[in-house]
């Protein structure tokens, strides 16, 4: 079982086999939520523009599992949503990425690369742990996806090479991407 | 007329709308995901594409769900 064995649906509802991406370096990311406090669309789009000519593809999987909390009174979270335009990498159909209802692809990815902690140096690391502890303490356990914008880097042969938590900004993935291109 | 610029599935937009309703403030909703014209207008007002944006006259505005600022803007 590998990444290429999965078939997913694009946001237009078309079936897409991940085998179509053989030979490409992939970033698979649960995008979700134009709200939340970790929007990384712009950083991902910048990566895409920079490296797509060299064979990078970014596959975004929208998910509402982290956005549907009621963050009222939680000052850690910005109280607005951002309209994301100009994202040209592939966005797939909305679905779950953690727990029993997670899409098979994400069950596979989190099994391949487990949770190794947040990057404490990132400015949102503290906030993120706080929000999780307060709202979803169970999310902190195990290898499941912790929050929006968890990024999995896949090499040209379909191996899941590395997992980056939401506390790693897309621009900080450049070295790892370049090593695979 | 009070205008609220919003996007689909935006909890903060919902909160603003609910709040305005609770205060009997009439408003027009403009979903910037659905209309390019509204998108441009929204960008013109706040200089960014974040929502909700509430405006009374297209100049003075409040970004996000901020009761105190909304009260000040709307004279509540």
Image: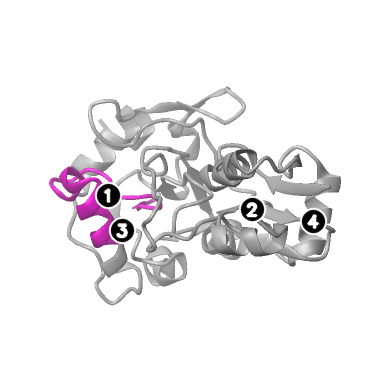
Q: Residues within 10 Å of mark 1 (few under 14, many from 20)?
A: many
Q: Position of residue B22 (x, y in %)?
A: 59, 39
Residue at mark 3 to residue at mark 2: CA–CA distance: 26 Å
A127 to A8, vertically: above or below: below
Q: Mark 2 touching mark 4, by CB under 8 A?
A: no
Could you tell me which residue is drawn at 74 percent across and 45 percent down? Answer: B32
Q: Nearer the viewer, mark 2 or mark 1?
A: 2
A7 to B29, vertically: above or below: above
Residue at mark 4 to residue at mark 1: CA–CA distance: 40 Å
A4 to A154, vertically: above or below: above
Per the image, label 2 sits on a secondary structure element best described as: strand
Taking the magenta stretch, the answer to whether it contains residue A44 is no
Residue occupied by mark 1 = A146
Residue occupied by mark 3 = A165
Q: Identify the mark nearer the N-term, 2 or 4.
A: 2
Residue at mark 2 to residue at mark 4: CA–CA distance: 15 Å
Name the subunit of mark 1: A
Residue occupied by mark 4 = B56
Q: Residues within 10 Å of mark 2 (few under 14, many from 20)?
A: many
Q: Identify the mark nearer the N-term, 3 or 1.
A: 1
Residue occupied by mark 2 = B51
Q: What stretch of residues is rendered in magenta? A: A128-155
Q: Mark 3 touching mark 1, by CB under 8 A?
A: yes
Q: How many badges with numbers are in the image?
A: 4
Per the image, label 3 sits on a secondary structure element best described as: loop
Q: Nearer the viewer, mark 3 or mark 2?
A: 2
Q: Nearer the viewer, mark 3 or mark 1?
A: 1
Q: Residues within 10 Å of mark 4 (few under 14, many from 20)?
A: some
């Amino acid at each position: 079982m590998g990444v290429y064995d999965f078939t997913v649906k694009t946001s237009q509802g078309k079936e897409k086999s991940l085998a179509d991406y053989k030979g490409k370096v992939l970033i698979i990311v649960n995008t979700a939520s134009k709200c939340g406090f970790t929007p990384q669309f712009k950083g991902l789009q910048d990566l895409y523009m920079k490296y797509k000519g060299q064979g990078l593809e970014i596959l975004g999987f929208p998910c509402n599992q982290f956005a549907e909390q009621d963050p009222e009174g939680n000052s850690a979270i910005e109280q607005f949503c951002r309209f994301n335009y100009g994202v040209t990498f592939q966005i797939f159909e909305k679905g779950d990425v953690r727990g029993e209802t997670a899409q098979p692809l994400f069950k596979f990815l989190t099994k391949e690369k487990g949770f190794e902690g947040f990057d404490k140096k990132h400015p949102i690391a503290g906030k993120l742990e706080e929000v999780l502890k307060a709202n979803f303490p169970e999310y902190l356990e195990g290898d499941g996806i912790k929050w929006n914008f968890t990024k999995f880097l896949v090499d040209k042969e379909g191996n899941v090479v590395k997992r980056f938590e939401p506390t790693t900004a897309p621009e900080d993935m450049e070295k790892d991407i370049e090593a695979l291109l | 007329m009070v205008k609220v610029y919003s996007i689909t599935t935006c909890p903060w937009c919902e909160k603003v709308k609910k709040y305005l309703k609770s205060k009997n403030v009439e408003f027009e909703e403009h979903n910037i995901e659905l209309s390019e014209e509204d998108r441009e207008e929204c960008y013109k007002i706040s200089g960014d594409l974040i929502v909700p944006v509430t405006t009374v006259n297209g100049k003075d505005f409040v970004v996000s769900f901020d009761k105190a600022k909304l009260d000040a803007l709307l004279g509540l």
